[in-house]
Image: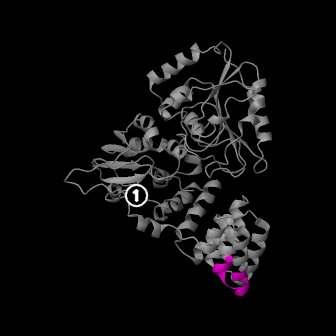
């Protein structure tokens, strides 16, 4: 889903020769662009679930061919994860109204939630045939095509995020033409991180160097998050990485997420170099000295980075379903010759210390992803859930064991224990939704047999 867009961006006053930097649309326009909640959805959010359902069912009973009412009830049942009831309702309605785009899209969402990817793709295609160009349906189709490995078409549909409510592209980007793959010799290009979380930013940073190498723009500027800025500006070919608008001089702009679509990336051509990001040598040396000076330091010990919670990086409230309760990893303490170093920022740190396993915690010193990368450079392997730390370690070429929920992110494909994005990453997936015990046990065994350093 769309993450927080343009994190940490603030636009200072621009020079007089340029229009003033955009501070965002007025509040009333934002409210108008946001989806309007129905009375039943408001009741549901207020905890009046039974009353919301009663009203929805009454609307359907009043007109069994009211597709809008049926779609609303179906969406309610999906939110409550009552999938069998939703399927019975939607299939019965589609037997009478087979060409209704809303019902077809809702049926596609049901297949999506059940991880029935080919079926979801089919329903979203039928919905688009009934409602050509429908933005949200195109976006959801793109996510399912990514899971299926149909990268070229997927990225074409993912570009529709620009049309979705909440995608507030700053004025200083809107004034620039979008780049569609034209020759860039003598031209200046702005790449902006306009989508997703920090992990997505790190994952797609690999495409920046490709643009520099293959298209040779006169200059390459990157508008990115503050915590990734030092890593981004060290990528070969980046002339400037920044987090505020200032005065922009560029001929074209392109969203970071859109580059693979522009250059025609397929599943088989995903660029996966051994490493494509680098921490500053001085930072790497600092963390090397710090780890070597710790009482736990001794030769022949495997240094394992550990991250168990996904959420917000800078300590804000929020914890994703991708997270694992740290006590489930307590069996790590039984492993001989292993040293665990926390990479956990934000939500999840409050679970330390963890009974049964000693975890060294230096994360107060991690100010940004550049610091995190420097610490990871001094480790042997990283054990993590699906969060930005996994991407940082993969981008540095470190071995990664990633613990993955069954409803995995759209870039991890289906049923695979490897990934074309990171050659050194191993995926350990849940067999059943929400059950982490077996995944954690497999992680412990993987580290038990992991070669120790000489």
At a point 76% along the width and 51% down the height, the residue shown is 433
At a point 46% along the width and 60% down the height, the residue shown is 167
Crowding near the residue tagged with mark 1, few <14, some 14–19, many ≥20 C-alpha atoms within 10 Å: some
At a point 59% along the width and 32% down the height, the residue shown is 343
At a point 61% along the width and 40% down the height, the residue shown is 347
Residue 244 inside the magenta-drawn segment: no
Left or right of residue 327, residue 381 in this image: left
**Residue under pointer 1:** 169
Residue 67 inside the magenta-drawn segment: yes
**Residue 303 % position (x, y):** 65, 22
Q: Quadrant of residue 90?
A: bottom right
Task: Confirm whether residue 99 shows in the render.
Answer: no
Task: Confirm whether residue 75 shows in the render.
Answer: yes
Given residues 397 and 447, the one toward you in this image is: 447
**Residue 209 % position (x, y):** 43, 40
User: Start and end of the magenta stretch?
Assistant: 58-70
Question: Looking at the figure, which quarter contains the C terminus?
Answer: top right
Given residues 360 and 440, the one toward you in this image is: 360
Q: In which quarter of the image is residue 337?
A: top right
Given residues 158 and 435, the one toward you in this image is: 435
């Amino acid at each position: 889903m769309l993450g927080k867009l343009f994190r940490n961006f603030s636009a200072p006053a621009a020079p007089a020769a340029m229009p003033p930097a955009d501070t965002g649309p007025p509040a009333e326009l934002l409210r108008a662009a946001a989806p309007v909640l129905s009375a039943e959805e408001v009741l549901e959010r207020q905890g009046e679930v039974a009353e919301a359902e009663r009203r929805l069912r009454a609307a359907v009973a009043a007109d069994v061919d009211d597709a809008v009412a049926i779609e609303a009830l179906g969406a309610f049942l999906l939110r409550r994860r009552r999938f069998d009831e939703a399927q019975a309702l939607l299939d019965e309605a589609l037997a009478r109204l087979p060409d209704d785009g809303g019902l077809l899209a809702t049926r596609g969402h049901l297949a999506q939630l059940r991880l029935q990817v080919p079926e979801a793709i089919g329903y979203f295609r039928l919905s688009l045939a009934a409602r050509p160009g429908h933005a949200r349906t195109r976006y959801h189709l793109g996510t399912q095509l990514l899971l299926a490995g149909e990268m070229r078409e997927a990225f074409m549909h993912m570009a529709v995020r620009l049309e979705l409510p909440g995608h507030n592209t700053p004025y200083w980007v809107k004034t620039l033409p979008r780049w569609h793959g034209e020759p860039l010799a003598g031209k200046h290009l702005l790449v902006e991180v306009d989508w997703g979380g920090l992990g997505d930013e790190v994952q797609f940073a690999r495409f920046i160097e490709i643009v520099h190498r293959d298209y040779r723009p006169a200059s390459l500027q990157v508008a990115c998050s503050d915590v990734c800025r030092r890593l981004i500006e060290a990528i070969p070919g980046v002339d400037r990485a920044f987090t505020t608008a200032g005065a922009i001089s560029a001929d074209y702009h392109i969203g970071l997420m859109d580059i693979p679509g522009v250059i025609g990336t397929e599943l088989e051509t995903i660029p996966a170099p051994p490493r494509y990001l680098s921490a500053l040598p001085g930072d790497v040396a600092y963390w090397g000295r710090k780890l070597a000076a710790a009482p736990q330091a001794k030769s022949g010990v495997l240094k394992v980075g550990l991250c168990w919670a996904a959420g917000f990086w800078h300590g804000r409230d929020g914890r994703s379903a991708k997270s694992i309760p740290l006590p489930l990893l307590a069996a790590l303490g039984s492993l001989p010759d292993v040293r665990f170093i926390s990479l956990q920022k934000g939500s999840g740190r409050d679970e330390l210390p963890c009974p049964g396993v000693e975890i060294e915690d230096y994360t107060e010193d991690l100010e940004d992803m550049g610091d995190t990368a420097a610490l990871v450079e001094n480790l042997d392997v990283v054990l993590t859930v699906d969060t930005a730390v996994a991407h940082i370690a993969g981008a540095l070429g470190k071995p990664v064991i990633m613990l993955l929920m069954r409803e995995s992110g759209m870039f991890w494909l289906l049923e695979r224990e490897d990934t074309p994005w990171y050659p050194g990453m191993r995926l350990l997936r849940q067999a059943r939704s929400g059950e982490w015990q077996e995944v954690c046990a497999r992680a412990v065994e993987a580290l038990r047999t992991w070669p120790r350093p000489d």
